[in-house]
Amino acid sequence: MKNAVLADQVAPLLEDLAALYEDLHQHPELSFQEERTAGIAAQRLRDLGYEVTEGVGRTGVVAVLDNGPGPTLLIRADMDALPVTEETGLPYASTQTGVDPDGATVGVTHACGHDMHVTWLIGAAAVLAEDRDSWSGRLMFVVQPAEELAEGADAMIADGLFERFGKPDVCLGQHLAPAPAGWILYRGGPTMAATDSVKLTLHGRGGHGSTPEMTVDPAILAASTIMKLQTITSREKAAADLAVVTVGTVRVGTKENVISDRAELGINIRTFSERVRQDVLASIERIAHGESHSCGSPRDPDIETIHAFPALVNDPEATARVSAVFTEHFGEGRCMEGPQALGSEDFGAFATAAGCPSVFWFVGGHDADHWLQAFAANRLAEEVPYNHSPKFAPVQDPTIRTGVETLVLAALEWAGKSA
Ligand SMILES: [Zn+2]
Ligand SMILES: [Zn+2]
């Protein structure tokens, strides 16, 4: 296949892909509940001639196409949505609700663009299935559940992904980003941060709100701990050691005239290196103990890991190959090195488990003119909704065709007959 004809191969698919995208967008499903989405992806891949297996890692789908000797490529899209109520005002906005793991009814929205990821994957699967003369090898398309819980990739691997379907020579994936639509951002080496979420329980001694002298007030203990935690990144780590410590939840007490006996803090940590990660975790433990001691707490604090997943590290050589073909195809104006992102991804788990290189890049989806105006006015934060925002509203064109073309180009870089 000549890349010059790629746009012509994608063009006839676009009307159908737009309809698929809007349908997925209107029917988002929470992590590990992606039954409908998985069913649609499986049926479409089957119709394209792939050998499809459903229920891998609970709701995951694997679609394989053998096409002669050559490398095995794992190409992945995640498919879960978020417990967010959509506020985009789009004609195809989600009005769905779902039940979260705590049993609460919540609005559900594709606020991270995983509906776009599935659409891209189906488009690329169609182009490559249609044009089997242009490549040789084995395609393994993976439609992954529960990325937002950082559990889906591990669930598929634990369900025998590589034993049942073979080990890949390279893993390829992409994410929708709040960059101008049609732009592609790549980066070799550490690209997305490691995440740790911990629950910190601080112990006080409860009592009556009128007699604080009889108590150890965990609200005060929580407040001083939260403030002290902010000195980890500002005072304990070098400015070059990227790290974020966020206290996202604070729970103390049930009534204004009751002093509670405990405070619970939900803490989220983002880091890029294992050394910095271990340092930050140790600092949190030290500060929690120190503040508890200083407040006269009757018990040491309890620290519990809620979830942890590693940094996403792109193979530098594989990234250079992908970025070279993207730049040749799309031009330098649309392809550039992106920043390290403090967001996190479980995509890296596939390559780590398979022992092969991986590349994960970003495709912009925000209206390009509006993005450039906002950038010039230094108003990106106010005007361009980030992933997970209830207002996250990608434009379909050229976002859909760009993401289909990037996946096909990357696949051909490894399996193309002229490669
Ligand atoms: Zn997300
Ligand atoms: Zn995402």
Image: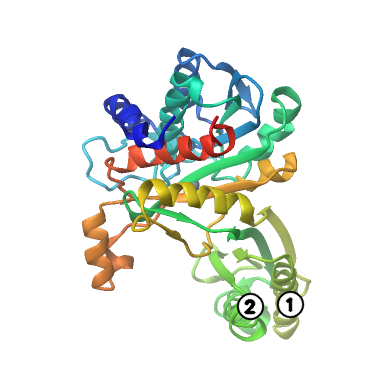
Residue 111 shown left or right of residue 8 in the figure: right
Disc number for residue 297: 1
x and y, in percent, of residue 173 in the image:
53, 42
Quadrant including the N terminus: top left
Q: Residue 31: tell me if it is visible.
A: no
Q: Residue 348: tell me if it is visible.
A: yes
Dot 2: few (<14), some (14–19), or many (≥20) neighbours within 10 Å? many
Residue 340 shown left or right of residue 197 in the figure: left
218 vs 64, nearest the viewer? 64
Which numbered disc flags the more N-terminal residue, 1 or 2?
2
Q: Is mark 2 within 8 Å of ligand 1?
A: no
x and y, in percent, of residue 315 in the image:
64, 53
x and y, in percent, of residue 131 in the image:
45, 21
* Residue occupying the point 58% across, 48% down: 359
x and y, in percent, of residue 98 in the image:
44, 35
Estimate the spatial distance between the alpha carbons at disc 1 and disc 2, rounded to whole Å. 8 Å
Marks 1/2 in contact by CB < 8 Å: the verdict is: yes
154 vs 16, nearest the viewer? 16
Residue bearing the label numbered 2: 221
Snapshot colouring:
rainbow
Indicate the amino acid at tag 2: Leu
Classify mark 2: helix, strand or loop: helix
Indicate the amino acid at tag 1: Ser
* Residue occupying the point 58% across, 37% down: 414
The answer to whether residue 151 is above or below residue 242 is above
Disc number for residue 404: none
The answer to whether residue 228 is above or below residue 393 is below
